[in-house]
Image (cartoon, helix red, strand yellow):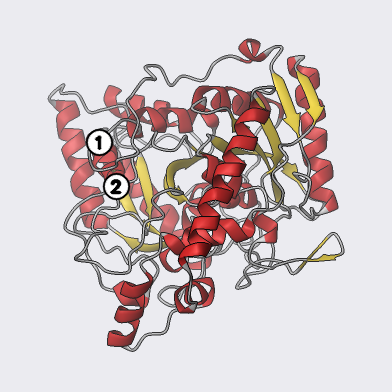
Amino acid sequence: MSAPAPPPAGTSLAAIAQAVRSGHTTALALVEETFARIAALDASLHAFCTLDPDGAYAAAERIDQRVLRNEPVGPLAGVPVAVKDLICTRGLRTTFGSRLYANHVPDEDDVVVERLRHAGAIIVGKTNTSEFGYGAFGHNAVFPTTRNPWNLDLTPGGSSAGSGAAVAANLVPLAIGSDGGGSVRAPAALCGIYGIKPSMGRVPAYPGCRDERYPGVSSWESLEHIGPMTRTVADAALALSVLAGPTPKDRFSLPCDIRDWGVRPAETLRGVRIAFSPDLGFAAVEPEVRAIVQAAVVRLEGALGCSVDMAHPEIGGYAEAFETLVAMDTDRRGLRRMATEQGIALEGWLASLVDRDWSADEFTDAVFERKRIVNATWRFMERYDFLVTPTTACAAFPLNVPGPDTIDGQAVAAGSAWLAFSALGNLTGAPTASVPVGLTRDGRPVGLQIMGRHLDDLGVLALSSAVEALYPRVGPGLACSRKWIAD
């Protein structure tokens, strides 16, 4: 008798786990299929930087044995998962995208990795990122540059670059990213998948080995969120049901007050108040991106019968304050010391943050500017249930650049202008997601961003699902297109 076949690519997380629990497939078959896909496609994509076949096959065998013994195996039983290389995995190399940690193997798991394993998920490997996450792209000095499955000459965004590319190319159905200023949502938008940054503290962000033993590995403690990247909203909701909940390892972690992470039906959204802003009052936006997102909002208004106003909180640009807060959360002294001791130069935005002499007044001013933005936003959100914008100011752009230096005919800051909509959700801690809403004329995905009220993760998931229903997912053509890619 032949071994049970794995479910086809694109099967939901819940259906995968149910197939394993029921014996219709095995965790071993899922792992074999996953590594076959990775072998077929990742030489072109470079989504993964480290694979763990030994650990994955061993975990699959344990799950299959538990199924045979009729023991519980968890809500993600047998689901192959990729984990961003900024998130610690016990016994599996975690480089943070830096030559300073090129051979580093943590001795403990991040909280989210512990929870994934406990839920029966199988960690198949680590996905590529920028150095320590300081850059919304997928290139560093350790590994080959991650490419976008829709067009291999374009970036997948970042810094959860490999996670976005891996899900978009159907290498795995679930990847974990981190988001300090758009690093889940930007690659989700550019790769045409779903990504959600839950409320601050909803998913713990314990930085594993990031303590005094490992200088320089900075956690943006007041900005960083951990979130799932998936093909569908329902898959993200299931992942959040596993990942969410408090831990003493993260002082910002929230009590688990959500008992049912199931996506609410669209009928519950009738009459909600939506503010739509194509530019937040200050951003330069690619005209085609603006038009695609605006068309999606019109469709949504018609489908839900909701109220939509063209409006935005009066916050102005916040790039300078955001950069200063990132610098404040960066172990600049530790990085300088490590770089000097190892004779390794830091690169890009990270190098500029570390080398600059920051003053206490600059940090204080940024903290108060954040308070002003938070206050303006909550007052605005008293009138609206959701704020909808483009996720990014442009669609995917060429590899190995931090971003376009011109958008809609305007000269802009290449590293930050295309992310003009991202950091508001990090500064406020509000739940924020990116949903794919179509393609540009030349086939680049476009994302619509939904920000909800304080702690309204379920509302963001519900509205995301309503948008998703209007735009059934289309898979990438992929320059190295093969049978593994399911539309």
Circle 1: element type: loop
| Quarter location, residue 240 | top left
Q: Are marks 2 and 1 in contact (CB under 8 Å)?
A: yes
Q: Is residue 468 visible?
A: no
Q: Quadrant of residue 214?
A: bottom left
Residue 362 vs residue 317, the one in the foreground:
362
Q: x and y percent of residue 211 in the render?
A: 23, 60
- State the residue lying farthest toward the front: 361
Query: How many numbered circles does the render carry?
Result: 2
Q: Which mark is residue 10?
A: none
Q: CA distance from mark 2 to mark 1?
A: 9 Å
Residue type beneath disc 1: Thr
Q: Is residue 177 above or below residue 148?
A: above
Q: Position of residue 113 (x, y in %)?
A: 28, 45
Which quadrant is the C terminus positioned in?
Answer: top right
Q: Earlier in the sequence, mark 2 or mark 1?
A: 2
Residue 163: x, y in percent? 47, 52
Q: Residue at x 75, y 24 (%)?
A: 300
Please rate how many residues cluster around mark 2, counting C-alpha atoms within 10 Å: few if below 14, some from 14 to 19, many from 20.
many
Q: Residue at x 60, y 43 (%)?
A: 372
Q: Give the amino acid at mark 2.
A: Tyr
Dividing the picture into quadrants, the one containing residue 314 is top right
- In depth, the one of 428 and 403 nearer the eye is 428
Find residue 456 and report its horizontal and vertical position in percent. 52, 25
Residue 178, visible in the rendered structure? yes
Q: Which residue is mark 1?
A: 247
Front residue of 432/353: it is 353
Front position in the image: 238 or 434: 434
Helix, strand or loop for disc 2:
loop
- Near mark 1 (Cα within 10 A), the count class, few <14, some 14-19 or many ≥20, is some
Quadrant where the image shows the N terminus: top left
Q: Which residue is mark 2?
A: 206
